[in-house]
Image: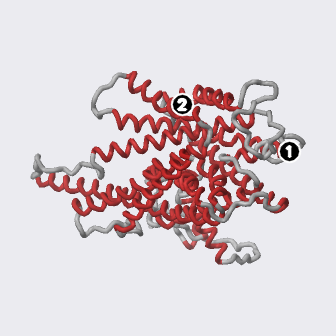
Amino acid sequence: MRSGSPYQRLHPALEDNPHGDRSMATPASPPPTTMVVVHPFVRAICMMFTLWISTGLVYVFNLIVGTGALTLPSVFNQAGWALGVSLIMVLAVISFITVTFVIESMAAANAIVQWKRLQQMKRALQASESQDEDSEDTPLFSPVGCSLFFLCFAVYLYGDLTIYSAAVSKSLVDVACTYHPSDLPCNSTVPENAFCWEGSRLTRLDAYRIFLAVFLCTLGPFVFFNVQKTKYLQMLTTLMRWLAFSIMIVYAARKLIYDGPQGHPPAASLSGVPGLFGACVYSFMCHHSLPALVSPIADKTRLSRFLALDYVLIAAFYLLLALTGAFAFQHLDDLYTLDFGPRANGDCGTGAAWPMMAMEYFLALFPVFTLSTSFPIIAITLQNNLKSLFLTEGRHYHWCIRKMAFPLLAVIPPVLIATTTENLEILVRVTGSYAGASIQYIIPALLVYYARQKTLRVIGMGVKNEFASPFHNCGWVWFVILWAIACSILVTVNFVQRLIV
C-alpha cells in the first residue's frame, strides 16, 4: 500500500509514535460510549455517497443537472406522466451506454499513443528506425470526420448560447414587467404582446429584446479575454443550483400535500414526445466534457459503476422534479422557475410574506445568476472550436481575425437568433434533437467503432481494454445510431406537421 493512501491508517497506539516503538505506546483507556447500531443498508448508502464525493463524480452530476432540467416539467406534462417516466428512464440508459463508449474510446486512444511511443523508443535504441515508415499519427476520425465533429459541436454550442440568452432575458422580463392583464389568471403565461408596465406602450417582447441587448453588452466583452480561475464562482453557482432545485421540489411537494393535485397530465400523449426527447437529450448531456472530468480522477477502477450511480441519481432527480411540477401546478411555463415567480402562485404578487417573496424572486432570478456565469466560458469554447474548424494550423492570420472576428462570431449569432423567439421549448427541442443527438449518440458510437478497429490494427488481438464498455457487442453501436436517426426523423416530422397545420 503506497504512502499517503486514504486507506492507510495507523494503529491508534502508534498515531503519536511515528517511529513505531510499541514499548512506548500506552494507549489511554477510552471513555465508555453508547453502542449505536447502524442498519447495513444505511451504512452502504453512506459509503456509496462518501465514495461518490471522494471520486469526483459529484462534478459529473453538477455538470449534467443544469438548464435542461428547468425545461423538463413542461414537456413532461405534455407527453403524459406514464410515457414521460418511461422515456426519461430509456433515454437515461442510452445516454449511459454512450458515456461508456466515450470512456472506452479515450482509453483506446491513450493505449495507442503509449504503444507508439514504446515502439519508437525500441527502434531508437536499436538505431534501425525507418524514415519512410508510416507513423500511424492520424486520429480516430479522418480529416473530414474531424471537421464534421467540430461543426456539430459548434452548432450545439450556438444552440446552448441561444438558450442561455433567451432564458436570462425571459427571466428578467418576468421579474421587471409588473403589468398583468385582468382577464388572465395569475398562474398563466402572459403573452409577449402584453404591456410591460401599466400605462406604458412598451410590450414584454420589446423589454425582452432590450434585456437581450443589455445581456450581450454586459457579458459579450468577456469573450475577448481568456476567462480563468473561475473555481469559486463555479462553487457559488453550484450551491445556488442545489438550493434552487431543492426549494422547487420541496415547494411543489408541499403544494401537492396541502392543496392537492392542481395539474392533471394525461397518461400518454404522443404529440409531446418530440419535445420531451429534445429536452432529455439536452438534460443528460455530459459527453463533450467527459475527458476533462474523468482524466483527473485517480482511481478509475470502478468508473463505470459510479457513472451508472450518477445516472440513476440524475434520472430519479429528474423524475421527482417533473412529477411534482406536473401535478402541483395547473399551468407550467417552458422555463420552470417562472412558475415560482412573484405573480405565478395565485396572488399576482400581493399579500405574500417577505420570506415567500424572497424565495420567489430568488427562483425567478436563478437562471440569471447561474447562466450568466457560464455564458462567457461556453462562448470562449465555441470560439476555439470555430478556430479549429476554419483556421489552418501553422498558418499566420491577422490579429483582427483571431482576436476580433471569432469572438464576435461566437456571441452575436446566438443573441440574434434569440431575438426571433423567446420560446425555450422550441430552442431546446432543436438543439437537443439534432446537434445534441449527434454529440450524445452518433459521435460516441462512431468513436468507439473506429477506436476498436484502430486498436486491433495497431496493437493487435492480445490486449484487453480495462475500460471497455459493458455494451461491447457491435449491435449496441448500430442500435444507438439507428435510435438517434429515428428520433431525429420523428422530431422533423412533428415540426413539418406543425408548420402545415
Residue 24 appears in the rendering? no
- Crowding near the residue tagged with mark 1, few <14, some 14–19, many ≥20 C-alpha atoms within 10 Å: few
Residue 193: image tag: none
Q: Residue at x 44, y 58 (%)?
A: 486
Whichever of labels 1 and 2 marks the residue nearer the N terminus, that label is 1
Residue 12 image-quadrant placement? bottom right
The one of 223 and 3 positioned closer to us in this rendering: 223
The one of 431 and 359 positioned closer to us in this rendering: 431
Tell me: residue 477, above or below residue 335: below
* Residue highlighted by disc 2: 416
Residue 172 percent across, percent down from the top left? 69, 35
Of helix, strand and loop, which one carries label 1? loop
Q: Are marks 1 and 2 in contact (CB under 8 Å)?
A: no
Q: Residue at x 25, y 63 (%)?
A: 456
Residue 121 appears in the rendering? yes
The one of 299 and 288 positioned closer to us in this rendering: 288
* Residue highlighted by disc 1: 347
Tell me: residue 131, above or below residue 169: below
User: In the image, what residue type sits under mark 1?
Assistant: Asp
Residue 32 percent across, percent down from the top left? 76, 75
Q: Residue at x 38, y 58 (%)?
A: 445
Give the total number of marks visible in the rendering.
Answer: 2
Q: Residue at x 86, y 42 (%)?
A: 354
Q: Is residue 333 left or right of residue 464?
A: right
Residue 490 percent across, percent down from the top left? 49, 56
Residue 215 image-quadrant placement? top right
User: In the image, what residue type sits under mark 2?
Assistant: Leu
Task: Please name the colour scheme applied to the rendered image.
Answer: secondary structure
Residue 333 percent across, percent down from the top left? 69, 47
The one of 234 and 265 positioned closer to us in this rendering: 265
Tell me: residue 249, above or below residue 153: below
Q: Could you give the CA–CA distance between mark 1 and mark 2, rounded to whole angstroms? A: 35 Å
